[in-house]
C-alpha cells in the first residue's frame, strides 16, 4: 500500500527529529491545542484553511520548538 505525503513525512522526517507538534492542516482541525490568530490590524480571526494545493509549504504547520 502506498503512503501519502503526510505519513511519509511523519515516518522519515518529523518522527526521527522528534517534531511532535508539526502537522499538515488536515490534522489541525482535530487539534484543540492551537493559538488564536489575528489579522495584520490586530483583529481576532480563524486560521484559514484554504485549498491545500495552493497553501504555502504544502499546508505544513509547526511550532517554534519543533522548528528550532
Image (spheres, rainbow, N blue to C red):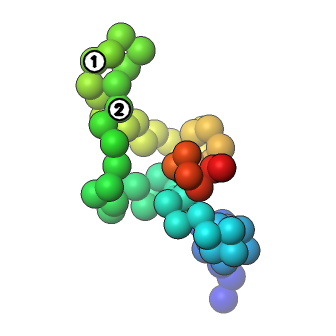
> Residue 19, which numbered label?
none
Tell me how many marks there are: 2
Give percent across and percent down for residue 4.
63, 71
- Reply above or below: 56 against 66: above
Give percent across and percent down for residue 60.
58, 50
- The reply, left or right, for residue 19 in relation to residue 43 is right
Q: Around disc 2, counting alpha carbons within 10 Å, would you say few (fewer than 14), some (14 to 19), or many (20 or more)?
A: few
Give percent across and percent down for residue 6.
60, 67
* Secondary structure type for disc 1: loop
Kindly identify the residue that appears in the image at 52 percent across and 49 percent down.
63
Kindly identify the residue that appears in the image at 68 percent across and 82 percent down.
2
- Reply above or below: 3 against 54: below
- Reply above or below: 60 against 12: above
Residue under numbered circle 2:
37
Please indicate, yes or no, whether residue 27 appears anywhere in the rendered image: yes
Give percent across and percent down for residue 59.
56, 47
Q: Quadrant of residue 7?
A: bottom right
Report if the CB atoms under discs 2 and 1 are less than 8 Å apart. Answer: no
- The reply, left or right, for residue 13 in relation to residue 30 is right
- What's the CA distance linking mark 2 and mark 1? 8 Å
Please indicate, yes or no, whether residue 4 appears anywhere in the rendered image: no
- Reply above or below: 62 against 17: above
Kindly identify the residue that appears in the image at 63 percent across and 50 percent down.
67
Residue under numbered circle 1:
43
Please state, as top left, top right, bottom left or bottom right, where the N terminus lies in the image.
Answer: bottom right
Amino acid at each position: 500500500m502506498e503512503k501519502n505525503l503526510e505519513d511519509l513525512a511523519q515516518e522519515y522526517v518529523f518522527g526521527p527529529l522528534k517534531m511532535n507538534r508539526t502537522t499538515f492542516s488536515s490534522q489541525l482541525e482535530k487539534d484543540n491545542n492551537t493559538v488564536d490568530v489575528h489579522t495584520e490590524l490586530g483583529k481576532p480571526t480563524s486560521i484559514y484553511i484554504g485549498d491545500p494545493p495552493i497553501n504555502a509549504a504544502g499546508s505544513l504547520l509547526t511550532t517554534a520548538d519543533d522548528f528550532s
